[in-house]
Amino acid sequence: MNLLYEGKAKKIYGSDQADQVIIKFKDDTTAFNGLKKDTLDGKGKINLKFSRYFFNLLHSNGIRSHVVSFLDETTLRAKKVEIFPIELVVRNCAAGSICKRLGFKKGIKFDPPMVELFLKDDSLGDPLLCKAHLNYMDLIAEEDLLFIEKQALKINDILIGSLDSKGITLVDYKLEFGKAEDGEILLADEISPDNCRFWLKGTMESLDKDVYREDKGDLVQSYGRLLDILGI
């Protein structure tokens, strides 16, 4: 296969269909824009399990994604999309960077949920964007931005409804969207504990990449525990 792009956690290859790509999940784990990095055996398989579970859940609730099919334990086939250079972070509780940036106390609930926009650019440290910035940057059409913001909040409702019943608090998560060749905007990337924060309900015990960021234990074991809780 022809390697088109390699990121921190995935490799993207061309496929036998011009409008599709093959995405392979890696065992690499990074934090702090790649400043901390390790390879953890089996992590790629685990993240694909989570992505299959969440993408299928969202698809059954009317959310269209780039996923075409799951090929094996670490690989999926997806529609080729042009990713918007914007990361949406949906926050239900205060944690991580927003506590450092703005002084929110960890665990404070946001009602309604907060949606933040970040420029997808590692070289700049993925800086926060405001709507005024977007007026001067040719990143996304206004109607497309409104659509993905609405989709992000709809996704939030679906995920909370599912996770709450299993004793998991959805703290926050990152989403990426892209536009397919036919102009349809699709949810892309992955949904896993790599880009979501999950706490055991009623606690702040992490079952996500904060375990790795903050040296709080074995990341693969924590992810496996979450798999068991969700019945995956």
Image: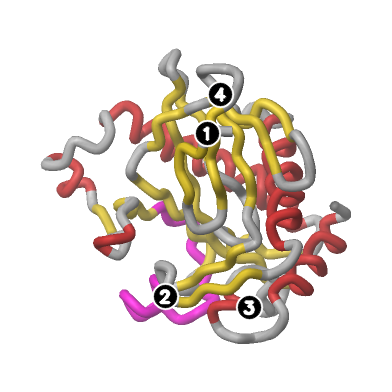
Amino acid on which disc 3 is placed: Val
Foreground label between 2 and 3: 2
Q: Residue at x 50, y 79 (%)?
A: 106
Are the residues tagged 1 and 4 within 8 Å (C-beta)?
Answer: no
Tell me the quarter of the picture where residue 20 sits. top right
**Is residue 189 placed above or below 95 in the rendered structure?**
above
Does the stretch in magenta take in 103? yes
Q: Is residue 33 left or right of residue 76?
A: left
Secondary element at image label 3: helix
Question: Which residue has dot 2 on it?
Answer: 35
Numbered range of the magenta stretch: 97-115
Q: Residue at x 43, y 35 (%)?
A: 148
Amino acid on which disc 4 is placed: Gln
Amino acid on which disc 1 is placed: Asn
Amino acid on which disc 2 is placed: Leu
- Of labels 1 and 2, earlier in sequence is 1
Q: Which mark is residue 211?
A: 3
**Is residue 18 placed above or below 135 in the rendered structure?**
above
Q: What count of labels does the image hold?
A: 4
Q: Residue at x 31, y 27 (%)?
A: 143
Are the residues tagged 2 and 4 within 8 Å (C-beta)?
Answer: no
Query: Could you tell me if residue 133 is visible in this image?
Result: yes
Question: Which residue has dot 4 on it?
Answer: 20
Secondary element at image label 2: loop
- Of labels 3 and 1, earlier in sequence is 1
Secondary element at image label 1: loop
Q: Which mark is residue 2?
A: 1
Foreground label between 3 and 4: 4
- Of labels 2 and 3, earlier in sequence is 2
